[in-house]
Amino acid sequence: MRSVSVIGIGETQMGRFPARSLREMVSIAGEKAILDAGVEKKEIQALYIGNFVAQQLCGQGHMGSQASEVLGLGNIPTVRTEAACASGSEAFRMGLIAVMSGIYDIVLVGGVEKMTHRNTETVTEAIASAMDYELEMMEGFTFPANFAMIASRYFHEYRNVKREMALCAVNAHHNASLNPDAQMPKEVTLEAVLSAQRIADPLSIFDCSLVTDGAAFVVLATTEIAKRLGRHRVVEVIGSGHAGDVITLAAKKSITSFAAATSAAAQAYKAACLGPGDIDLAEVHDCFTITQIINIEDLGFFERGHGGDAVAEGVTALGGKKPINTSGGLKAKGHPIGATGISQIYEIVTQLRGDAGPRQVRKADIGLTHNLGGTAGTCLIHIFRGE
Amino acid sequence: MNKYKIYTFSVVRSTTPAFLDRLPYLCAVLQAPDGARFAALVEGYRDGMEVHVDDAVRSVGKDERGKERYALA
């Protein structure tokens, strides 16, 4: 297998842009990534794009062909991936495998989502299509409800970490306040999070990620090409893991650890010949604050039941020993579902290049992205090394 | 009577259009005596009631879809 690196990155501002079209967001982020890579469009051999709900919310399918037209990529093959909130990372892995295997030398990978033009109930219903329609949605389950039930069980098996969950939100908003692309770049207090409107007990609105319009793209190429271009610090993809699990919450063996995540992590660490202690920083899938606590345990950063302790001790804060979600995460940078996995990679590459400005992590050589789909029915993990 | 218990739960306060008139309602993963788990909207919840993991739940018959319904015991 060949070594592959990220040679270009681009993303839109994340936020509520109901008048902004899918085409406009693809154009902004895609053109930025290609320009950043310093390659000609005719050198791009394939396009992979993640999207979750454009058919439901925008009436738009065939996203690969649309993105190729918008970006003027000619007759190259295009693939649209859908794995709920992990759609973007799935596109990334498909592009990665294609370059690793020698099918292509340079590919464009992206994700896009347009959501805020529809009302909250309609968006909630669309997102809920990532769970089992008959068994869960028709019983009144929603994603906040599913993760609230995960939190309730976590409280039962370990201890009540409502305060530590709130601290995850406080950290996320602080980091987002330093990120010009973030949807909610403003600080929040612990008291404000704890007293916020309840959505699904024990989750309040500040425990939930955002509804976001946005797009993100990256260009992948062989590391040989990346070194020849010499435009940026080379950021090599050194580990990739992809695993699945049952779709329903009730059928999972455990709901306080996600089997898809532990399996994907094991694959990625093995490929990278690294362990959890080698990771300098990570972007993890904080669709809800309880999820961040479980994720950092699943990744092996902290012992089971002690992820909240690490958050409370400041270990996961921007200046901590293991900074988590320096971008602001899904919670405050935003969660443009099909683009989220690529947006996480955008942040890690930005940090590994040393371009993160006021939120720059001092030692940023090895970064990790962790992207869940649905109720952890899918997980993709990637590890990156700056050379 | 089968003795089901709550494996985990949440009181839902924001939902999809089809369930808006039920708010707030109790979603739960229930556990049957043989250990099997399944999703259910549990009837009989009124706002402010105390609910806990391992609380008992009883079967209260079937709905118009032929699906078994459950209520707090």
Image (spheres, rainbow, N blue to C red):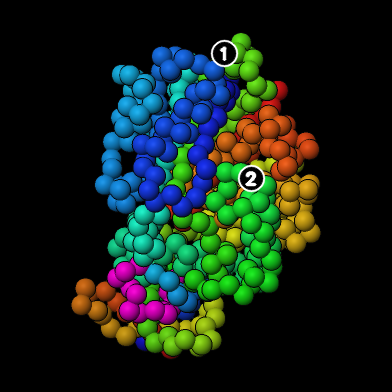
Q: What residue lies at 30% left-to-right and 30% top-to-bottom?
A: A65
Q: Nearer the viewer, residue A3 or A363?
A: A363
Mark number, residue A179 = 2
Mark number, residue A225 = 1
Q: Does the rendering let one see residue A214?
A: yes
Give the magenta part as a residue range: B16-30
Within 10 Å of disc 2 (Cα), the crowding (few <14, some 14-19, many 20+) is many
Q: What residue lies at 63% left-to-right and 18% top-to-bottom?
A: A231
Image location of residue A40, percent across then percent down:
46, 15
For label 1, the SS is helix
**Apparent side of residue A373 relative to residue A285 in the rendered image (left or right):** left
Q: Does the rendering let one see residue A307?
A: no
Chain where mark 2 sits: A
Q: Which of A370 and A45 is in front in this view?
A: A45
Query: What's the distance in space between the residues labelled 1 and 2, CA to CA?
Result: 30 Å
Q: Reply above or below: A14 against A151.
A: above
For label 2, the SS is loop
Q: What residue lies at 46% left-to-right and 67% top-to-bottom?
A: A145
Q: Nearer the viewer, residue A180 or A167?
A: A180
Residue A116 within the magenta-colored segment of the rendering: no
Residue B28 within the magenta-colored segment of the rendering: yes
Image location of residue A226, percent across then percent down:
59, 17
